[in-house]
Amino acid sequence: MNKPYKIAVIPGDGTGPEVIREGLKVLKAASEKFDFEYKEEPFDFGGARYLKTGKTITDRELSSLKKFDAIYLGAIGHPDVKPGILEQGILLKIRFGLDQYINLRPVKLYNSDFCPLKDKRPEDIDFVVVRENSEGLYKGLGSFKNKGGKNEVAIQVSHNTRKGVERCIRYAFEYCRKRNKKKKLTLSGKTNVLTYAWDLWQRTFDSVKKEFPDIQTDYAHVDATTMWFVKNPEWFDCIVTDNMFGDIITDLGAMIQGGMGIAAGGNINPKGVSMFEPIGGSAPKYTGKNVINPLAAICALSMLLDNLGESKAASAVENSVIKVVNTDLKSLAAGRMGYSTEEVGNLVVENL
Ligand code: IPM
Ligand code: MN
């Protein structure tokens, strides 16, 4: 028997705990069916703890996360905490601190009934966005001049390093090769305006692509990318982009795959500890009502299992989600699924 996987669980704020509970139920069922062992350890990082103690996540706590095989995160964000504190103090601190330099966001439609686009089928919407997750505008660099004054200037810098850009682009090429679908990688940027940052991205892309002659490459400006997401999503296979653009286009991606109820992502350090999360946030207005859709968290669990090397369990979980989405649910939206959060979790377990 292999050593049990060590999984850090951060349920977090709002509906996070409700969806993570369902994910953990599915994890338990998958471990029994696919014969692996794991130990979960809960962490109470989040808005409630911050309001009580003033602590987001300490350096010591951050470093204690390094001993895990994976992190499973619900959501971070609390209506009583000023925007930015928890996001920077917890979520971004973990992403940066554990050098999770890739944010992997699959955009996959499981049932055309849940797609807001006319006449798009599951085979038309099946791509992955590889978002750089450690640099760019998220680096927090900038300054105010004459703060509060009439001539105030606020500067926010996009910081891109050759090393950071190159490792992200190389990961995207490798991922595209391994995914083995259309074998096409699109660089999505803004070379026509952001002539420093995107010059570096374009040059790096052009040099790395020489190592991947089997991958077809393409470039689209990020604004045009959003247009194609709606008009011709079937053109895409893998997309690589920077942190800010990736943040924006993956919310649109989530919508065309059926909404925040189904969209999952992974914060990946290919050689370290990765963290998996539903990308929808804490949804305060649905908290505690047992109406939120847990499938995004369950899809995040499937990504986590794949990352651990439990690829059979990962596909079984995904296939069970596909079954539930196609046979049971009336909608993927909170409160309109026709089932409670808990019942949807049970359905996934039953179909596993
Ligand atoms: C996401 C979120 C975060 C981001 C926020 C909560 C800081 O929107 O994971 O996409 O901007 O990366
Ligand atoms: Mn976002």
Image (tube, rainbow, N blue to C red):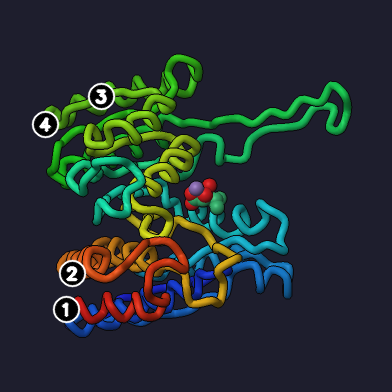
**Mark 3–mark 1 distance (CA, rounded to whole Å):** 39 Å
Return the residue at label 1.
34
Q: Earlier in the sequence, mark 2 or mark 3?
A: 3
Q: CA distance from mark 4 to mark 3?
A: 13 Å
Q: Position of residue 114 (x, y in %)?
A: 32, 54
Q: Which mark is residue 316?
A: 2
Categorize mark 1 by other alpha carbons within 10 Å: few (<14), some (14-19), many (20+). Answer: few
> Which label's residue is closer to the chain start, 2 or 1?
1
Q: Dot 2, crowdedness within 10 Å: few (<14), some or many (≥20)?
A: some
N-terminal label among 4 and 1: 1
- Tell me which label, 4 or 2, sits earlier in the chain: 4
At mark 3, the secondary structure is strand
Tag of residue 218: 3
The answer to whether the residues at label 2 and label 3 have Cβ atoms under 8 Å apart is no
Q: Alpha carbon of mark 4 to alpha carbon of mark 2: how far?
A: 29 Å
Q: Could you tell me the amino acid type at mark 1?
A: Phe
Quadrant in which residue 234 is drawn: top left
Q: The disc labelled 2 sits on which kind of residue?
A: Ala
- Given residues 231 and 310, the one toward you in this image is 231
The residue indicated by pointer 4 is 214
Residue that protrudes farthest toward the right in the picture: 149
SS of the residue under disc 2: helix
Q: Is residue 149 visible?
A: yes
User: In the displayed structure, would residue 85 be above or below residue 325?
Assistant: above
Q: Is mark 1 within 8 Å of ligand 1?
A: no
Image depth: mark 4 or mark 3 in front: 3
Q: Residue 205, how many percent across, how many down? A: 30, 26
Rendered image quadrant of residue 304: bottom left
Please name which of the two marks, 4 or 2, marks the residue nearer to the observer. 2
